[in-house]
Structures are given as structure tokens and as C-alpha cells.
Image (spheres, rainbow, N blue to C red):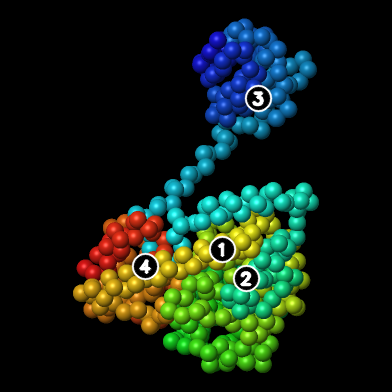
Amino acid sequence: MTRERSSSPESGLDLHLDWSGRPDSSALAEALRAAIRDGRLASGSRVPSTRALANDLGIARGTVTRAYAQLGTEGFLLSRQGAPTTVADRLRSGERPEPAALRPAPRTPRWDFRPGRPNLSAFPRKDWLAASRRILRAMPADDLDYGDPQGPLALREALTEYLRRARAVHTSPDRLIVCNGYSEALSLISRALHARGVSSVDFEDPSLPHFRTIAEDNGMTVHGVPVDDGGIDVAALRSPAAVVTPAHQFPLGVTMRAQRRTALIRAAKADGRIIVEDDYDGEFRFDRRPVGSLQGMAPDTVIYAGTASKTLAPALRIAWLALPARLVEPVREMKTHGRYGPLFDQLALGELLRSGAYDQHVRRSRAAYRARREQLLHGLDGLRTRHRRYPAGISAGLHLTLRLAPDGPGEQEIMARARSRGVELEALGPWWVRHGEHPPGVVIGYAAPAEHAFRPALEALLDTLDP
């Protein structure tokens, strides 16, 4: 038997019921909950007796009794000996919660040139699956416990070896802390430093606003320090901590010169300053070997931060910090009270590093992104509007920053043209820290489009930039 709609003459109540076979008290309870929530059964009103409702619906009285008992336990109904069962007073018909406002799903751009995104279609699925199977087969049962807040030792050991070899980072497993993405890493650092009396931090100007907000949300005052062709202006530093991107400044694209790196380390040691090195895409240098980390020059002064979001995928939410010895325990304590990371993904990354599959994937990606950068530069050279790289950024990374031509469209016009063509990129204007006049520009991430879509995406981008 299937009953889709029933009513009770005693209450005049319509109940929407849908059951097959034997009537179910759970279905009846849910129908009554719905009637209470939407006001068909008002607060304080009587509900039909179990006998009456059972007769009206043609079901066993015990089914109704069980449904009423469940709703009484949940607080929807109030039963008193010698009195009729009523809807609980606290559930007033006018107080039912409004439906939650549904956020519109994020619009997926047709042509995605947003910076900071790798080619997700190139994620090494087969290698990842093989690594996951190997770690699951070999994983002791004890590894399924809450684990170490610093992250699984197997991953920290693999990272120690990889970072030494690929990025010249001087660290050890006990100085590494695995985080849920770089945002959490920066939050942990900010909180730990603030707890030690550090109240302000310098950021490169321009830099990503989201990261500056993280520092501010954790009690820091943010100062912007200018960047030129040699990197951050060391003489303009004013805070006891500074966040820098020395291998490939984000977003302008320069590499910090050797003299500037030396000056930064000397000034930091002299003033007791902590440097946070955000090495977000250091593996992707196209014209020569990647420059080594700043941390390798001064492991007790520089916090090194790396991430898998550019080499593999942002969704993994895996980043890491190589810390000076004195900061390991404070940051570990912060991490202990936070969220532990996805164990299986972390172990799979460790296995990918040990097997060499990670290095192979980075080499494949490096070749693909180099080819894309060359295609983009060739296309820009053919435009009538003479935009220039801002400044002369190095051949590296996953993005390119353009200084817009003075006689061409400005940032707002370019962004409007981009939206009308289904192209997504970033205006440079909001990324400046200091107020005032800044040359207009756009930040173009050329890694995100899938391989088969890159050519038409590039054509749409060039059409956007050349009115």
C-alpha cells in the first residue's frame, strides 16, 4: 500500500505521507514534524488522539503511539496524564526558522586566468592512487589514532629530504610542522609571534590582500614595504617580522637579488627580526635552476613556508613550515588547539615524494608552464596596445603581471571587458598596501586552463587586452 496524502477529520490536518508496504512510525513522525514547523499544527494546539488518527489513516494504533512518543522525546509534543497531547508551547508557528539563504554557487569562469591556480586536469591521479594504496596496505593500526599535531613523521621525513635537495632548505623532521594550507600556516605564525610580543609585520607592497588580512585578524598591524627590481626595500623595513617571497615576488614576479638577500639576513640578525619566506612556487623556474631558499642562509632567523597547492592542487590543503628551533614549540602548541590535517592525503604526499613521482610531476609541469608562458608572451608581443611586464619579471612561476599601457584601457575597463568575454583575471589595484597613485595593471595566471582549452582561452584573453 502506498499513501501519498491523508487527513484527520478531528484536526482538519493534512499530512503528506509517502510509504510503501507496512506503514512506518518514522514517516508519520516526519509528517507531523513538518506540520508543526510550517504552522499547520500551531503551538498549544491539540493533536488527534492515537485512536482517532490511526482510524483516519487506516494504520495500527501502535504506529501512531510510537510516532507521538518519538516527538515527545524530541520536544515537539507535550503529553500529560489525563490531558490531551498538544504541540509544545515553545514551538510557535510564527517562530519557525526562515529557510537558510542559499549562496549562489561560485561562477566557474569559461576562461580561467586567475593567479595561484595550477592546471588541475594535470593532477597525477594514477601516481596518487598508487601511493594511496601503498600507504594503506602498509599502515599500522596505531597510525589511525589522533596522531602528532606536527603532522605524520613519514611525511616530515620525506619533506626534509626533498626540501634539502630541491630548495636548499636546512631543517629536520622535528622542526617541520604540516599545516592545512598556507593560510593556516600564516595564521599559526601570526598567533605565535603575537603571543611573544610581536605586534606588527611588514608585507611586500604589493602583496595578496587575503594574507595581510590573516595577520591583522591575529592581532598584527600590517605595514607595506616597497618592492623594486631587486626585491623588497630592506632599508624600509620597520616591524619585528616580515613576510617575503624572495624566489618569485608575488605578484610582480622579480627575484630578490643576492645583495638584497644578504642585506635582509644581516638586518634581521642585527635587529632580532623574524623573516617568513613564502616559497609558493619556487620549483617553477624556466630559464635556469631555481634559486635556493632564503632559509638556507639563516635557519634560525627565517621561517620557511611551502605548499603543495601550486605543484599538485589547492584542494589538498597541505602546507609546511620549517621553523627556527625556538619557535617549534610555540607553533606546535597553537597547532595542537587547531585542526589536524587529512592524514591519508598527507601520507600519500609523503609516499609520492619518496617514490620520485612528485619530482617527475614537477618536471612535467615545469615544461608545460614554460611553454604556456612563451605562448602568452608571444601573443602579448602581437597586440596593438603595448602593455609591459611589471616590472621585468623573471621566467618563472604560474602568473604574469602586466603594467597596462598609459594610452589604453584602465583596470576597470579591462575587468569589464574580461567579464563580458567569460575571462577571469585579477586587477592589480587592490593588491597595493599603501594608498596613493599606482600604475594600473592586471595579474594573469596562465596555468589553470586545461591543456586542450589553453589556445582558445589565450585568444579570449588577448582579445580582452587589445580593444
* Secondary structure of the residue carrying numbered label 2: helix
Residue occupying the point 66% across, 85% down: 298
Q: Is residue 43 left or right of residue 461?
A: right
Q: Counting residues from the N terminus, which is met first, the one under dot 2 or under dot 3?
A: 3
Look at discs 4 and 1 and give the one toward the viewer.
Answer: 1
Q: Quadrant of residue 156?
A: bottom right
Residue occupying the point 66% across, 66% down: 158
Q: In the displayed structure, would residue 368 be above or below residue 441?
A: above
Residue carrying label 4: 372
Residue occupying the point 61% across, 61% down: 355
Residue carrying label 2: 162
Q: Residues within 10 Å of mark 4 (few under 14, many from 20)?
A: some
Q: Is residue 459 left or right of residue 165?
A: left
Q: CA distance from mark 3 to mark 1?
A: 61 Å
Residue 87 is marked as: 3
Q: Nearer the viewer, residue 261 or 77?
A: 261
Q: In the displayed structure, would residue 419 be above or below residue 391?
A: above
Query: Which image quadrant: the N terminus?
Result: top right
**CB within 8 Å, label 2 to label 1:** yes
Q: Residues within 10 Å of mark 1 (few under 14, many from 20)?
A: many
Q: In the displayed structure, would residue 88 be above or below residue 166?
A: above
Q: Position of residue 334 (x, y in %)?
A: 72, 66
Query: Which image quadrant: the C terminus?
Result: bottom left
Q: Counting residues from the N terminus, which is met first, the one under dot 4 or under dot 3?
A: 3
Residue occupying the point 78% across, 17% down: 81
Q: Is residue 57 left or right of residue 395?
A: right
